[in-house]
Image: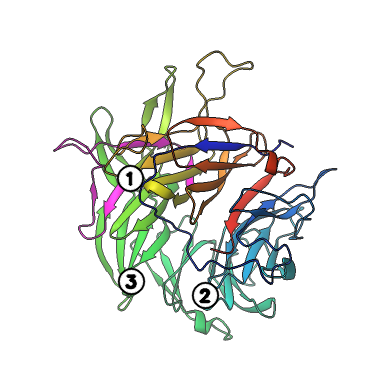
Amino acid sequence: MKKLLILLFLLLPGTLTWLSCGSSSSGGGKTSGIPYRAFVSDSVSTGTSSAGIYIVDAQNDIHPGTLTPISAGNTPGMMVVTPNRAQTLVFSGNNLLSSDNTFNIINNAAETNAAHVTLPGYTESFVVSPDSSTAYVAVPTAAVAGQSPGAIKVVGLSAGAFTGEVDIPSVHYLSMNNSGDRILAFSSNSDSVAVVTPSNLGTQNPVVTYIGGFDRPVQASFSSDDTTAYVVNCGVECGGNQASIQQLDMTTGTLGPKGAVCVTDPTQGVQCAASIALVDGSTMYLAGTPYTSGPNSSPSFTCNGAQGETLTCGLLTIFDLTTMQPVPPPNCPAGQQCPIAITDGYHNRIAMGSNGQLFIGARTCTEIVPPQPPPQGAEVRGCLSIYNTQGVAVGSIQPGAVTIPPETGDVTGIQPIATRDVVYLIQGQNVQGGTLYIYDTTTDAVDTVEEQNLSNLVGNFVDVKTVDF
């Protein structure tokens, strides 16, 4: 396994914007005694390391070598921290026949595996109720008697047991509203959204309302009062027609205004894409890879690499939820749209770091891997893009500019560290095995250095989450 490296992506300090929030706490009552912890999931056991959840001191970037990993199944990966930060939920599975498919409940204070249940298949999406009592897990391959596979499994977190189920064919992704009284469920290759009422899921025949008129929906964000859902339509990239944002009135169950997630490139025409979104106030940032329509659909947005390679690019779109229209990036000349090119692939990770730096991760992107030894000045490109959302330069990164760090592989975890100009990131799946990198946003230099305090952290890492702030 590759030893952990730290990538210092250094940007001029600016305004702090964080996705990770919550109260800071002391180290009292925690087995490790570490006040500010990050959990890192390791999916592989070797002769020198064990699969499990490693604990990192996120305030000092230290992994105490005496701490053994927390057990969390055979191949722990995706993690979600409950709103009250008392528990971390970990899915262990590799989507193979040998997958254990366990859903593990970690007690954050005791730093132990408190309970686990075995799911009927692989999952890529689970959400937690606002009161931290219940988890809802989408299992698209769950066997259901008399109908197509697919179900949401309900897990009571205090008892660590299944408490309900609702059958939804091929259910893949879940979005929960702010109050926790509605879940929108999205199924693969479907143009409908399933509306689920969590309070009904313990009954024998829970009611599910299906609403059509979408275009391969994959995600939703909600207004502060939960009256409106902003549904992300993936469009052509997911086998549909056009990427867009579709309003859904959550009171009446009717469709509202829709806005296309499209911009015009001067040489390549109209480009549309959206597979993941992040909302900041009334602004939504959407990432995706544009595709041509038709039976032989293929990526349609190209870009030129620094060494002259013609590559496929992804697209980042800035969308105004008040006007339901895309808006140009900072410093874009009047009358132009200025498409924002990012790495391609299927974008499924996004987070806002300090200084308005937007981290966008993808899987299965088009990579540039130079021959070994690499020629002088050889370009390296992986699946991570970082976009400057600020109206001013951050270091040498201009407003509306994108930088692609020279690291390869899929991005599987992004975690901004609150109170610091630091972002933890897991990258390298399908290349060298997942590696934990630390991006420190204080200047514009890019260096890869050895970090002595973390040199004993070895593994094939998948996800990273802070549990104390």
Residue designated by label 3: 224
Range shown magenta? 318-347
Residue 453, picture quadrant: top right
Q: Is residue 238 magenta?
A: no
Towards the viewer: 376 or 169: 376
- Compared with residue 168, is residue 101 higher up or lower down, i.e. above or below? above
Quadrant of the image containing the N terminus: top right
Residue 202, picture quadrant: bottom right
User: Which amino acid, mark 2?
Assistant: Ser
Please say whether residue 148 is visible from this viewpoint: no
Residue designated by label 2: 129
From the image, give the main secondary structure of the stretch colored magenta: loop
Give percent across and percent down for residue 56.
66, 53
Towards the viewer: 396 or 192: 396
Q: Residue at x 32, y 75 (%)?
A: 225
Q: Residue at x 63, y 15 (%)?
A: 373
- Compared with residue 215, is residue 225 higher up or lower down, i.e. above or below? below
Q: Is residue 237 left or right of residue 411?
A: left
Circle 2 sits in a helix, a strand or a loop, which is it?
A: loop
Circle 3 sits in a helix, a strand or a loop, which is it?
A: loop
Q: Residue furthest top?
A: 375
Q: CA distance from mark 2 to mark 3?
A: 16 Å
Q: Residue at x 36, y 31 (%)?
A: 396
User: Which amino acid, mark 1?
Assistant: Thr
Q: Is residue 326 magenta?
A: yes
Report the disc number at residue 389: 1
Give percent across and percent down for residue 452.
69, 38
Q: In this figure, which colouring scheme has been used for the structure?
A: rainbow
